[in-house]
Image (cartoon, rainbow, N blue to C red):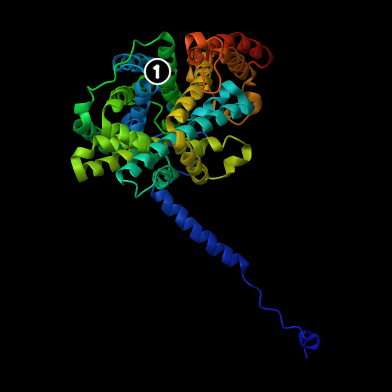
Amino acid sequence: MGKSEKTGVAAADPPVDVSEAESQALSRSTIWLDRLKRWGLETRGMQPVPLEERTDTRFINIFFLWFTMNVNILPIVTGMLGTLGFGLSLKDCSLLILFFSMLCCAFPAYCSTFGSQTGLRQMLISRFTFGYYFIVIMVILNLCTNAGFGIICSVTGGSTLAAVSSGSISSTVGIVIISIIAMVVSFIGYKFLHQYERYSWIFNLVAIIIATGVGGKHLSNQVEQPAASASTIVSYGGVIAGFIIPFSALAADFSVYCHPKVSTWRIFAYTYAGIFFPVVTLMILGAAIGGATPNVVSWKDGYDRFTVGGVMQAMLLPAGGFGRFVAVLLSLSVIGNLAASIYCISLNFQLLAPFMLKVPRSLFTIVYTVVAIPVSIQAAKSFFDSLENLMYLISYWAAGYVAVIATEHFVFRGADFSRYNPDHWDQPTKLPTGLAAIGAMGIAFGLTVPCMSQEWYTGPIAKTTGDIGFEVELVLAALLYVPLRWVELKFRPI
């Protein structure tokens, strides 16, 4: 009799071939991963793109990406804020949009050239100014900025869907639908995002043209406004800057796979044109819509019920069922912007801590979406207040960021891209400390506070001048960085 029988214990089961089971599971996961790669899934995260992988010569895609990101309702909303929120006349608002956009578009356009020349993403190239550790502060600010724009996109698209459905779909459900579609596009990554942006602008532009054609007869019915004060002009200028300049903090992310042989002027021109033309055109259209909304009963009623989405739906109401279809296209137009924002968010997460580089980029798109949906639902309750405050706050840090990055590049590196060694991206001792950059931005921000005008705070200078925080931060950060960087170079000549 065996020992197991004597003790009353059943004989042990034959050993399981664990290695075979693991091998089968690994094989299945590999098959799925290979399939996703064939569909265009980007597995590379924030790490530098090596020269042999920077082979994309379809440089026109840069233009289409930026064009699609801005051919949607979002610039229209920002334009409406000028006439409906700031009380500017259509003429004054249009001139402000034109001239501030001409200046502000230059910042993201130049930052875009860094990607093709270095193979480094925007926040990664920023380590050569802010250092290995202090860049985390910029990453957090950039995450908040992109998340804020993403929330605005979700709210705008969701409210438009709700308006089209006459209430059968709530704004909450609309926000969920828009967010999930954008998440899928950004989840796959760079190639699919570029392909989506290359063609989706067509539907967006057609929908906007139709909406303008159907409701255009009311655009001349503008509310009479007094002459704009200097404080109102600079305040709304800060809003425009807050819309455009933050693109600088993600610009290089979309050009890292471009072949380095491309002229930097070509990348600059594609990016500048892709932002400038749709932003100016649609912001001015938005200003016209905002100026007419109080005088058009159906538009005002739509705005009161569904904010911006209600106005767009009311504009298309005369077109009947076809107008409802076009309004659906308008609601989906924000996906291009939202998907690009989520893509950059997924990359930025990886720089928060070294261990996060081991987490696949695509998983962070899901994390963001899960967090952003409830925040978007809450933000929808006071949309224009949320938008105005966000634009102001964004413009402050974004102005300081581009000022420091530009000063480092032109003054201390002689505008020479070869002076950025991609191999040093993860070596703290071969990067600047970042004290000069953070110090310049921090001191400049301290001097900017008296120039701020927010719903919750108005500085003593801003009471007279309006909000000039963006302008002050831009100039002071650049001026302060020069002496601070000289001191930094004495201790670490990098």
Q: Residue at x 78, y 91 (%)?
A: 1
Picture layout, residue 337 above or below residue 443? below
Quadrant of the rendered image containing residue 277: top left
Q: Residue at x 54, y 9 (%)?
A: 461
Q: Which residue carries the number 1 mark? A: 106
* Viewer can see residue 203: yes
| Left or right, residue 217 beside residue 44 | left
Q: Position of residue 419 (x, y in %)?
A: 53, 19
Q: Position of residue 14 (x, y in %)?
A: 66, 77
Neighbour class for label 1 at 10 Å: few (<14), some, many (≥20)? many
* Viewer can see residue 262: no
Q: Residue at x 55, y 28 (%)?
A: 141
Picture layout, residue 80 above or below residue 486? below
Q: Position of residue 315 (x, y in %)?
A: 25, 34
Amino acid type, label 1: Ala
Q: Which quadrant holds the C terminus?
A: top right
Picture layout, residue 296 above or below residue 419? below
Picture layout, residue 14 above or below residue 352? below
| Left or right, residue 254 beside residue 226 | right
Number of marks in the rendered image: 1
Q: Secondary structure at mark 1?
A: helix
| Left or right, residue 322 beside residue 471 | left
For the residue pair 107 and 309, the one nearer the viewer reads as 309
Quadrant of the rendered image containing residue 25: bottom right
Q: Position of residue 137 (x, y in %)?
A: 60, 27
For the residue pair 185 and 129, the one nearer the viewer reads as 185
Residue extending furthest toward the bottom? 1
